[in-house]
Image (tube, helix red, strand yellow):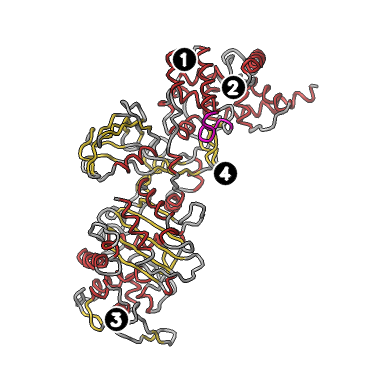
């Protein structure tokens, strides 16, 4: 017996040491931008309601409590939850604002901001979601309530409670269901730490011995704190939700300190069977389980009769954010790509960094909705990619890499496609920059021409309509997207100088040194196109689109901020000249459908793009608020019936109509 027991004892002793010394890997968290509320802000009631629902706020018809809002006669009254920002802590407070004609006309306090929504995390290989919390930050009713339901003798036993096992058996028989468990909290902690799944005598023996030894190494408070941080509370897709902090966020979108008695009872009840009592899927079952817990709390004095009665009348109050079916995966692809320049993947999965991004949840929602209707507005054979950024700020607001949620391929970020006539604004801009006597009033020849190439061949560009207009102004050539006139200008610039100009814009021309480059024979991703048109929308201020504002560590210290940068020295008046021509594109050129059919209010600016046989349909355009790039095409690169004006432009028009 000694030969068996002594090695076993030392083995269990070693296991308990690992439990005591265990430190959790905390995944880094990415947040959307916080919604800042101030007088004059363009904001519709629909957009604000969406944001509040996404953040887990509950609508109420009476004076709102923490995490609730009241909307009446164009006025919102919000009792915010507060948030610890790195630059300034925002306390929970009452916010009142009035919206008229989709604009905030009054707000108290004068500047307020809501907490940012979590859009993604960097998980370790086991996909556990957890953020540790100290015991004194957990409501006292929840701490006592856990012991009342799971382990009434917790303060008295030394890891195993034989009396508790007997009492639980009697209670369960009388109740006709399992209302109490025989395992102590310490045993459950051991089970969770060691990932025991099978039920056997040997496993129970392991638990009992480990629990007894663990009680000699940890105080009762330390065991409770470890339990609240370790226990499994449910599954969010492939991600396991561990710890009370993430459970409160997952089910209620609340900090633990703001959980009411009914919320606390539900979470304690769910511990018994996170799948069986999943309140999102088994609402009635979860409600009954919560009420059983409340009855136990009343019986043991954790709560009084008034609290018990009020909690039982309280609805589950689950966060609505999961019902909104928002998808941030494509945006997170951009965050991953940009954040790797500052941090290693190992740091992100372990160190609990806080990444504050530029994403606008409402714009992302509208962008995703638009992409999902690609087949409805066009046909079922084509795919789409959409990006939206701030026209002046260069901050990325939304990304959709596919028309379906099932697609795992982010075309907005990774699909390199020929851009066609999207390159023409750059051709004319380079003419303004490089040719001293050229302006948009200059005359170009829109007529057949023959161009020798480096491979001793002859290239003869054609116009999209097969016609030649003869001598026309550069403005007319750009507005009407005339190929022959554009090549005429390109030859004056020279191919070598134009390639160098593109490199200055951050566009690398690796293989194509053919004059067809003047007509867009170059492959770029939609994200790279967004960078290019950001030069025009910001009037040269921003060249690169950023998805990250700043990164902070677990102690809320800012580790780095994003900085807008440019590699060009373009004259603002030249950019303005191109913008004026792109405005005419939307009123009388290839994008006139935006003002005639969609009746979008302006001013609007943009350019269509089409490649041979409609393999790629593009539209990149902006107003004073947003810049958006849309691509439409087939993954197999086969022909489509769409040009830029009847393909990508359709999605762009619907998107901007829905954004306002």
Image vertical order of residue 197 relative to residue 654, above or below: above
Q: Please give the residue where the numbered disc 4 appears in the rendered image.
A: 125
SS label for mark 4: loop
Q: Which mark is residue 303?
A: 1
Instruction: Please check the rendered image and state whether residue 474 is part of the magenta-colored stretch, yes or no.
Output: no
SS label for mark 2: helix
Q: Please give the residue where the numbered disc 3 appears in the rendered image.
A: 488
Query: Which callout, 3 or 1, points at the residue further toward the start of the chain?
Result: 1
- Secondary structure mostly taken by the magenta-highlighted segment of the chain: loop
Task: Tell whether 219 sits left or right of 440.
Answer: right
- Pair 3/1: label in front: 1
Query: Which callout, 2 or 1, points at the residue further toward the start of the chain?
Result: 2
SS label for mark 3: helix
| Stretch of the chain drawn in magenta | 276-284
Task: Tell whether 243 sits left or right of 110.
Answer: right
Query: Which callout, 2 or 4, points at the residue further toward the start of the chain?
Result: 4
């Amino acid at each position: 017996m000694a030969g068996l027991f002594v090695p076993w004892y030392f083995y269990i002793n070693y296991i308990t040491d690992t439990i005591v010394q265990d430190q959790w890997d905390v995944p880094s968290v990415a947040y959307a931008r916080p919604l800042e509320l101030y007088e004059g802000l363009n904001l519709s009631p629909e957009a604000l309601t969406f944001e509040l629902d996404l953040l887990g706020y509950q609508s109420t018809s009476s004076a709102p409590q923490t995490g609730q809002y009241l909307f009446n006669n164009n006025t919102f009254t919000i009792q915010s939850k507060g948030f610890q920002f790195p630059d300034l802590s925002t306390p929970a407070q009452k916010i009142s604002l009035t919206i008229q004609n989709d604009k905030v006309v009054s707000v108290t306090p004068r500047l307020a901001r809501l907490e940012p929504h979590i859009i993604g995390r960097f998980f370790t290989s086991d996909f556990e979601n957890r953020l540790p919390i100290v015991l004194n930050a957990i409501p006292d009713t929840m701490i006592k309530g856990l012991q009342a339901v799971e382990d009434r003798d917790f303060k008295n036993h030394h890891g195993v409670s034989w009396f508790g096992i007997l009492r639980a058996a009697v209670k369960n028989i009388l109740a006709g269901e399992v209302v109490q468990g025989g395992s102590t909290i310490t045993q459950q902690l051991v089970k969770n730490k060691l990932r025991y799944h099978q039920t056997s005598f040997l496993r129970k023996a392991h638990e009992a011995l480990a629990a007894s030894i663990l009680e000699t190494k940890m105080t009762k408070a330390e065991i409770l704190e470890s339990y609240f941080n370790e226990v499994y509370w449910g599954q969010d897709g492939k991600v396991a939700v561990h710890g009370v902090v993430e459970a409160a966020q997952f089910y209620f979108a609340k900090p633990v300190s703001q959980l009411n008695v009914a919320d606390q009872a539900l979470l304690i009840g769910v511990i018994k069977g996170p799948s069986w009592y999943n309140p999102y899927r088994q609402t009635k079952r979860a409600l009954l389980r919560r009420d059983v817990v409340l009855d136990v709390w009343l019986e043991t004095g954790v709560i009084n009769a008034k609290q018990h009665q009020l909690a039982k009348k309280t609805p589950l109050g689950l966060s609505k954010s999961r019902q909104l079916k928002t998808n941030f995966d494509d945006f997170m692809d951009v965050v991953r790509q940009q954040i790797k320049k500052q941090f290693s993947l190992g740091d992100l999965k372990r160190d609990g960094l806080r990444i504050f991004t530029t994403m606008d949840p409402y714009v992302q929602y509208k962008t995703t909705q638009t992409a999902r209707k690609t087949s409805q507005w066009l046909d079922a054979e084509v795919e789409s990619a959409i990006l939206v950024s701030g026209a002046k700020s260069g901050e990325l607001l939304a990304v959709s890499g596919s028309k379906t949620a099932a697609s795992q391929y982010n075309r907005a970020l990774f699909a390199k496609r020929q851009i066609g006539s999207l390159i023409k604004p750059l051709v004319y801009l380079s003419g303004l920059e490089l040719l001293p006597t050229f302006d948009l009033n200059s005359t170009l020849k829109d007529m057949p021409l023959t161009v020798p190439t480096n491979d001793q061949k002859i290239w003869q560009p054609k116009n999209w309509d097969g016609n030649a207009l003869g001598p026309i102004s550069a403005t007319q050539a750009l507005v009407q997207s005339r190929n022959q006139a554009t090549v005429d200008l390109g030859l004056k610039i020279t191919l070598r100088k134009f390639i160098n100009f593109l490199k200055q814009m951050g566009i690398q021309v690796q293989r194509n040194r053919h004059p067809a480059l003047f007509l867009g024979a170059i492959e770029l991703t939609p994200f790279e196109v967004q960078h290019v048109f950001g030069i025009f929308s910001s009037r040269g201020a921003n060249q690169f689109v950023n998805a990250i504002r700043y990164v902070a560590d677990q102690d809320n210290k800012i580790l780095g901020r994003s900085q807008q940068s440019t590699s060009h020295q373009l004259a603002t008046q030249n950019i303005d000249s191109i913008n004026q021509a792109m405005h005419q594109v939307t009123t009388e050129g290839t994008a006139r459908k935006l003002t005639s059919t969609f009746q979008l209010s302006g001013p609007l600016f943009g350019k269509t793009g089409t490649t041979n046989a409609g393999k790629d349909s593009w539209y990149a355009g902006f107003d004073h608020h947003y810049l958006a790039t849309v691509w439409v095409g087939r993954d197999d690169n086969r022909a489509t019936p769409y040009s830029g004006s009847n393909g990508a432009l359709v999605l762009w028009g619907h998107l901007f109509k829905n954004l306002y």
